[in-house]
Image: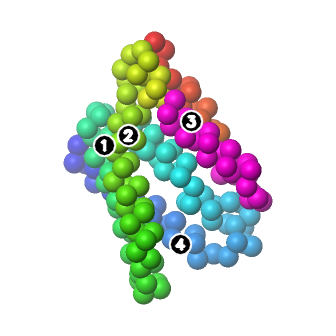
């Protein structure tokens, strides 16, 4: 389990660093046109990441710790990079995303309920799908010129329905 935790924390550091690097590019570059600049700002991305961690975790406990390690290391590296570059820390955003990171194991636990049978399993898969659906609806109604984040979330919804338990 320690190996899984260390790997997820290392990937979290890398993702947080890369998300901050993408923020440095102006919106009129190819990164802005592809929608990659705004992708890290969507809550749906974090639902997708949490779902992927839970799907690949060998146990529920391992998934909870992996999710928490990934999210906390991502938030830390993102704002550490912000401080190194700008010598400034936006404390409200750090607090907001730290709360999201601390709540991510709860979402992982909800998703892990898909391993059970009956209505609990259906709810374990429908809650993240509905959250992603509402996020995709917000993206469609927005004035974003790129539709790549929408397609990423729609593909994630399809995969989650595909992983829906058979019982």
Is label 4 in contact with label 1 (beta carbons under 8 Å)? no
Q: From the viewer's perspective, is the residue at label 4 or at label 1 nearer?
A: 1
Observer able to see residue 75: no
Colouring style: rainbow
Residue corresponding to mark 4: 21
The residue to which callout 1 is attached is 64
Q: Earlier in the sequence, mark 4 or mark 3?
A: 4
* Residue 38 location (% of width, % of height): 62, 62
Magenta stretch: give its range.
Answer: 126-151
Magenta-span inclusion, residue 115:
no
Of tags 3 and 1, which is closer to the observer? 3
Helix, strand or loop status at disc 2: helix
Q: Based on the displayed image, in which of its 4 quarters is residue 88 positioned?
A: bottom left
Of badges 3 and 2, the one in the foreground is 3
Contact flag, marks 2 and 1 (Cβ < 8 Å): yes
On screen, residue 122 above or below 85: above
Q: Residue at x 40, y 75 (%)?
A: 91
Observer able to see residue 133: yes
Binning the other alpha carbons within 10 Å of mark 1 as few (below 14), some (14 to 19) or many (20 upward) gives many
Nearer-N-terminus badge (4/1): 4
Relative to 80, is 24 on the left or the right? right
Residue 29's quadrant in the figure?
Answer: bottom right
Q: CA distance from mark 3 to mark 1?
A: 21 Å
Q: Residue furthest left?
A: 2
Which comes sooner in the sequence, label 3 or label 2?
A: 2
Q: Residue at x 40, y 41 (%)?
A: 107
User: Which residue is label 2 attached to?
Assistant: 108
Q: Residue furthest bottom?
A: 87
Q: CA distance from mark 2 to mark 1?
A: 6 Å
Of callouts 2 and 4, which one flags the residue occurring earlier in the amino acid sequence?
4
Give the number of the disc on residue 113.
Answer: none
Task: State the mark number for residue 130.
Answer: 3
């Amino acid at each position: 389990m320690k190996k899984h935790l260390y790997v997820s924390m290392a990937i979290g550091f890398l993702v947080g660093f890369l998300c901050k690097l993408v923020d440095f590019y102006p919106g009129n570059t190819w990164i802005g046109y592809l929608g990659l600049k705004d992708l890290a700002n969507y809550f749906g991305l974090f639902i997708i990441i949490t779902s992927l961690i839970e799907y690949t975790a060998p146990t529920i406990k391992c998934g909870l710790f992996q999710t928490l390690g990934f999210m906390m290391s991502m938030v830390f590296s993102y704002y550490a990079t912000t401080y190194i570059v700008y010598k400034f820390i936006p404390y409200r955003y750090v607090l907001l995303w730290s709360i999201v990171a601390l709540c991510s194991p709860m979402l992982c636990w909800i998703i892990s309920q898909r391993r059970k049978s009956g209505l609990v399993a259906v709810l374990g898969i429908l809650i993240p799908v509905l959250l992603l659906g509402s996020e995709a609806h917000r993206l469609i109604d927005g004035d974003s010129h790129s539709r790549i984040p929408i397609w990423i979330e729609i593909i994630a919804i399809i995969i989650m329905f595909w992983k829906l338990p058979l019982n």
